[in-house]
């Protein structure tokens, strides 16, 4: 009986070590979505705010009569993801209450500036390509406004 218990402990020890060894082949990595992604043709978007890519890529696509631009959905206060409130025609941050108009410009709460816009361009086939690693900002306090730079919007 004593021999069985000792062998059981040895096999248990070796088994746990084998599991720990195998665990190294499955690193605890966070797989984030690609920062450059295709969102389809400009004609796929009707006037207003499109939330199709909010969950997957954290952006809103804004279609206006003469242009398309992409708002990166990150509050400029502390980085929460605001929500689009269609009935109030504004983005509202659930964390501390900042409000942004339909173009992402702050007008209430602690947010210091408008939400950033992501780079948007056309690929050779005419599809829209968004790059959230290239952001355009508007910071009135710093005297910076990149919202009219090429790439911050796409004329349509
Ligand atoms: S993080 Fe949005 S208001 Fe504070």
Image: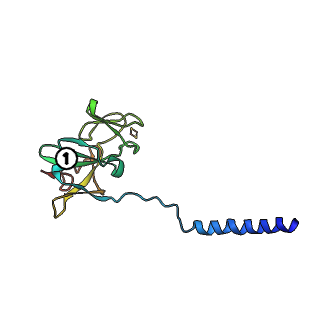
Instruction: Locate ligand 1 by image quadrant.
Output: top left
Residue at (19% x, 51% y) in the render = 153
68 and 116: which is toward the camera: 68
> Which quarter of the image is occupied by the N terminus?
bottom right
List the single residue furthest toward the right.
2
53 to 20, vertically: above or below: above
151 to 20, vertically: above or below: above
Left or right of 147? Residue 11 is right
Q: Write down the residue under mark 1.
A: 45
Q: Position of residue 76 (x, y in %)?
A: 35, 44
Q: Position of residue 12 (x, y in %)?
A: 73, 65
45 and 82: which is toward the camera: 45
Dot 1, how many residues are within 10 Å of its Cα: few (below 14), some (14-19), or many (20+)? some
Some atom of ligand 1 lies within 8 Å of the CB belonging to the residue at label 1? no
Which image quadrant is residue 121 in? bottom left
Which image quadrant is residue 84 in? top left
List the single residue furthest toward the top.
87
Left or right of 117? Residue 111 is right
Q: Position of residue 148 (x, y in %)?
A: 18, 50
Left or right of 54? Residue 63 is left
Q: How is the image coloured?
A: rainbow
Residue at (69% x, 67% y) in the render = 15
Query: Is label 1 in a helix, a strand or a loop?
Result: loop
Q: Position of residue 16 (x, y in %)?
A: 68, 65
């Amino acid at each position: 009986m004593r021999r069985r218990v000792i062998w059981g402990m040895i096999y248990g020890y070796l088994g746990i070590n084998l599991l720990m060894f195998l665990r190294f082949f499955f690193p605890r990595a966070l797989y984030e979505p690609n920062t450059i992604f295709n969102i389809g043709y400009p004609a796929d978007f009707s006037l207003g705010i499109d939330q199709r890519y909010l969950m997957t890529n954290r952006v809103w696509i804004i279609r206006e009569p003469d242009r398309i631009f992409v708002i990166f959905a990150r509050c400029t206060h502390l980085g929460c993801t605001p929500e689009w409130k269609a009935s109030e025609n504004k983005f509202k941050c659930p964390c501390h209450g900042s409000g942004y108009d339909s173009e992402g410009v702050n007008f209430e709460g602690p947010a210091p500036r408008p939400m950033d816009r992501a780079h948007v361009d056309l690929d050779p086939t005419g599809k829209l390509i968004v790059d959230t690693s290239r952001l355009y900002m508007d910071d009135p306090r710093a005297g910076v406004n990149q919202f009219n730079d090429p790439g911050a919007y796409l004329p349509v």
